[in-house]
Image: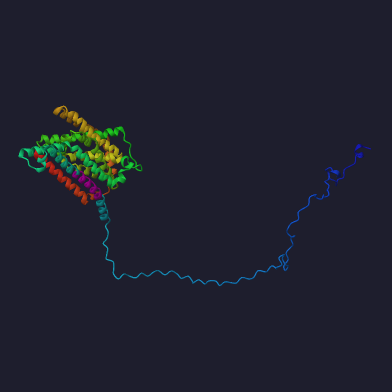
Amino acid sequence: MSTNESQPQPDSGASSQPTQPESSQPQTQPQQPSPYPQPQPPYPQYQPYSAGSPSQSGQHYQQPQPQPQYPQQQWPQYQPYQPYQYQPYPYAYPPQPPVDPETVRRRTLRKSVGRVAGLALAYQAIFTATSLIAGMVIGLAAAASRYGSQATSGMFSEQELSQFEQEVARQTVQWTGVLYLLAVAVGFAFMLLMRHRTILTRAFWTGDPHEPHAAMRPAWLLAFAAMLVGVQGVSILIQVAFAALGTPLASPTSEGIAESAVTVSMWLYIGLIGPVIEELVFRGVVMKELKPLGRNFAILTSSLMFALFHDDVVQGLFAFACGLIFAFVAMEYSLVWSIALHVFNNAVIGGVFSAIAGSFGDTGNVVYAVCLVIVGVGGLIWVLLKYGWGLREYVRVNRSAPGTYWGWTSGLFLTLVILNVLIALISFAMAMAGAA
């Protein structure tokens, strides 16, 4: 008998997993009574509810009763909207004339220019009236303090009257700088009262940050300074040409400034305070309010007003040429740079250098005039040759709309022009007659 036969064969229907012994099965333990007494609930044991059975309170639950039916509100049927029938007026509207857009535009231009011209005219009237009244008061007070009761009573001999007039004139010249400073202060107070919301802003002095402005470079600053010297040289050439023809040009303003520029107050007015206030008025207020009508129009109109403000033919032409330069600088750079150039023109070219040349007598004045002509005219030619194409392109790009110069027909602007031209012509004629 073989070894394979002696081993018992596993049943094919039995599981191949080994069976656990009976001792490994969990056995149920009998529940032991708790040694602690269990609390009894204070409420009765729950009883299932049955319909019709009384509750513990002794009352039966009632079935829900039907609710009364409320009558529904009947809304009126929607009626379509009927348009309102307007009743005709008992009278007919008068026929309206057709509106011409060009006429409306011209009227708007005249109002815009007239508003600015009226402001400049008021400033000039306040400036002139203040200087005249203060000059009379100061002159009379100074003369009266010297001559005592004779000045108040008016009892003078012919010689004493002549001396009194000379004293009044001398005191007026001595106090001219103070008069101009006082007049400028009053005029500035008026302008500040009228345009304080504009003047007391940073954009007024340094330019609007929302608009592109070029940065002033040394080369451009030198070019503008050369142009100012060139204007001085051309002005000297024109005066020399008229003098060569036997008709020297007289300038009452220039002569008055030369006579009165002997005090600190007059130097302060000519070299600093005057340029600052003039730039504030004519480039800061006038030109910027005219800027929406076009840059070329604003530059030209403000320069014309600036020239008329001087009430002098010769000085006015010179101021117009310089005003174009100042206005361009203020428009494209900032008001600060135009003030700097104006101070340079008045304090350095016409002040310090002129005083140094005058200290050497007539020879120094002639040499200085020749230098201004050579340097100025040469520098002006150099600037025009190098930057002339850019200036021409600037004028072309910033050309005002057709018909913009209808704004010059404003009543206030014409009043400003006519009054100042008459004053300038009268003073020029009197100066020319006195020179002859």
Residue drawn 76% across the image and 54% down it:
39
Across and down, in percent, residue 78 comes to 48, 70
Across and down, in percent, residue 289 comes to 28, 46
Q: Nearer the viewer, residue 272 or 228?
A: 272
Where 272 sits versus 360, above or below? Answer: below
Across and down, in percent, residue 331 comes to 29, 41
Q: Main secondary structure of the magenta part?
A: helix
Residue drawn 19% across the image and 44% down it:
128
| 114 inside magenta stretch | yes
Quarter occupied by the C terminus: top left
Snapshot quadrant of residue 323: top left
Give the residue at the far right of this rendering.
1
Snapshot quadrant of residue 95: bottom left
Quarter occupied by the N terminus: top right
Q: Nearer the viewer, residue 255 or 395?
A: 255
Q: Is residue 364 visible?
A: yes
Residue drawn 5% across the image and 38% down it:
159
Give the image's coloring scheme: rainbow
Where 177 sits versus 190, above or below? Answer: above
For the record, the magenta segment spans 113-129
Q: Nearer the viewer, residue 289 or 277?
A: 277
In the image, is 191 to the left or to the right of 48?
left
In the image, is 26 to the left or to the right of 98?
right
Across and down, in percent, residue 36 comes to 79, 50
Q: Nearer the viewer, residue 312 or 198?
A: 198
Snapshot quadrant of residue 270: top left
Give the residue at the far front of this rendering.
149
Q: Is residue 312 visible?
A: no
Counting labels gives 0
| 178 inside magenta stretch | no
Where 93 sits versus 114, above or below? Answer: below
Where 388 sits versus 96, above or below? Answer: above
